[in-house]
Amino acid sequence: MKNVSDFELPFDLSGEMGERELVEIHIGDVNLPTGRIVASDPFFSAEQAAFARSVEPDKYPVYIYVSEIDKLHHRIAYAKIKFRPEDATKWILALTEDITTEELGELEEGEFYGFAVESGLACFMDEETSEEFNEKLDVLQEANPEYNYYDSVLSEEFREYSGKNTFSRELGDWNDHKPNPESDNNIVMFASGWGDGYFPAYFGLNENGDTIELVVDFLLDEFEADEDDDEEGEEE
């Protein structure tokens, strides 16, 4: 097993986030019963390993940072889990244990390992929650191969949870979903910038190396808007 320090590739996220005027919104608290975090497209989380760096099991606040495209149009530029109230002073690329040291050595300047989004949605959840959620999807789709979880369950939740917010589209841009209503395990979901893509995550640390936050960058400046972006949540 590789040491977590093998994954500590420095990155200066402070300058990146400071370039835009962003609205911070607390969108819920994610329950991390194992402290092993999965950041992924919720419908493809079965293929996404948890990050090598873990945190103390607990519930932690999740924030999004929204950028104004125009007066009636906003997009999520960043999503963050905050583990400690203090500010991070340095950032490292958040990587999963399935990435080899050879692959890390092949990264060129400006390149990164991250996660793919194919449904226009990203999320934070615990590794345990990911397993439970994917087992539920498997059962539902085995019973009905045409079953669409977004249309049947999530679309109404998104509208109710965030659709009326000034900084959200009417269909809702974020949601706090419980795959099992009787469990505290949840998935905090949010629209991924312009939509589908491949996105990096970074752990923010203090000078002692303690984990302060986890930030996903939706690379808002690197993608152009697509007229079809509003078609969100199409599960394959």
Image: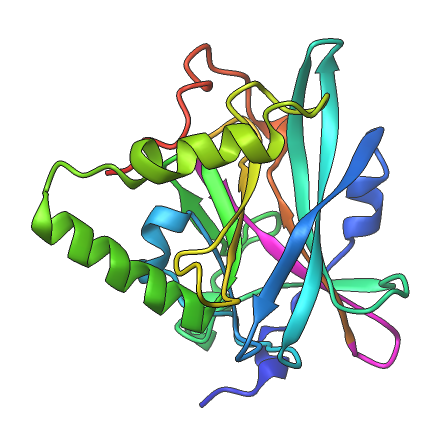
Q: Nearer the viewer, residue 135 or 24?
A: 135
Above or below 34: residue 148: above
Residue at (66% x, 68% y) in the render = 59
State how the image is colored. Answer: rainbow
Total marks placed: 0
Q: Nearer the viewer, residue 69 or 156?
A: 156
The picture places residue 10, in percent across and down from the top left corner, at 72, 64
Visible in this render: residue 120? no
Q: Nearer the viewer, residue 122 or 128?
A: 128
Q: Quadrant of the N terminus?
A: bottom left
Image quadrant in which you'd find residue 17: top right
The residue furthest front is 182
Q: Is residue 56 left or right of residue 209?
A: left
Q: Nearer the viewer, residue 194 or 3?
A: 194
Asked whether residue 192 is drawn in magenta, I would say no
The picture places residue 136, in percent across and down from the top left corner, at 26, 59
Residue at (23% x, 38% y) in the render = 236
Visible in this render: residue 127? yes
The magenta segment is 197-210
